[in-house]
Image (cartoon, rainbow, N blue to C red):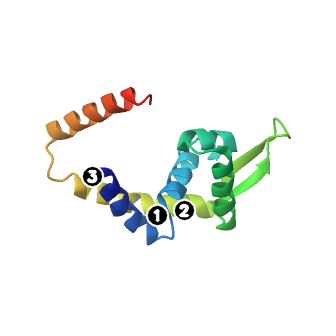
């Protein structure tokens, strides 16, 4: 019951910026990389997408001007996805809003509650193979 409500809550915030949850996670994955780049296969793995879905997602991000596709300098057969300045600026603008929304959701929990919640979620994730 919680998962769809959380998704709705955050998707509503993301939609104000013309973003979906999947697009947001892709931008965060690129932003978190020190070079702000990923191979399409890495994006597919991080987001647990098929290669076809990752390609469609990349197409969408390129069309929005949030990433670029470039040939790899190490291996010209490979393509590198790079976060653009516009993509980086978007992440830096939206991330604080999402952080504040997340903090508001958890405001009624004590530090002990949050530690227990994190511990339980990590155990669940381990059982799911993550």
Residue 8: x and y in percent read 36, 62
Instruction: Mark yes or no: residue 66 visible.
Output: yes
Mark 1 element type: helix
Mark 3 element type: loop
Instruction: Please report the residue visible at 42 percent of the width from the left and 57 percent of the height from the top.
Output: 95
Q: Earlier in the sequence, mark 2 or mark 3?
A: 3
Residue sitting at the far right: 76
Q: Which residue is mark 1?
A: 93
Q: 113 or 96: nearer the eye?
A: 113
User: Which callout, 3 or 1, points to the residue nearer the camera?
Assistant: 3
Name above or below for residue 113 compared with residue 62: above
Disc 3 to disc 1, C-alpha distance: 30 Å
Q: Which residue is mark 2?
A: 89
Mark 2 element type: helix
Q: Earlier in the sequence, mark 3 or mark 1?
A: 3
Say left or right for 97 vs 32: left
Instruction: Mark yes or no: residue 39 visible.
Output: no
Q: Which residue is mark 3?
A: 1
Name above or below for residue 81 compared with residue 17: above
Say left or right for 22 vs 104: right
Disc 2 to disc 3, C-alpha distance: 34 Å
Residue 115: x and y in percent read 22, 35
Q: Mark 1, residues whose alpha carbon is within 10 Å: few (<14), some, or many (≥20)? A: few
Q: Mark 2, residues whose alpha carbon is within 10 Å: few (<14), some, or many (≥20)? A: few
Q: Are marks 2 and 1 in contact (CB under 8 Å)?
A: yes
Numbered disc total = 3
Say left or right for 7 vs 56: left
Say left or right for 74 vs 121: right
Instruction: Please report the residue visible at 64 percent of the width from the left and 50 percent of the height from the top.
Output: 54
Residue 59: x and y in percent read 69, 59
Residue sitting at the far front: 1
């Amino acid at each position: 019951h919680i998962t769809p409500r959380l998704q709705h809550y955050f998707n509503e915030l993301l939609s104000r910026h013309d973003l979906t949850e999947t697009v947001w996670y892709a931008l965060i994955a690129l932003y978190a990389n020190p070079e702000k780049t990923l191979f399409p296969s890495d994006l597919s793995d991080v987001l647990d997408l098929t290669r076809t879905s990752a390609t469609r997602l990349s197409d969408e991000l390129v069309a929005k001007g949030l990433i670029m596709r470039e040939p790899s300098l190490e291996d010209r057969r490979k393509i590198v996805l790079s976060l653009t300045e516009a993509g980086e600026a978007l992440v830096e603008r939206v991330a604080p809003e999402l952080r504040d929304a997340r903090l508001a959701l958890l405001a009624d929990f004590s530090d002990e509650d949050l530690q227990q919640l994190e511990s339980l979620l990590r155990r669940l994730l381990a059982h799911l193979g993550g």
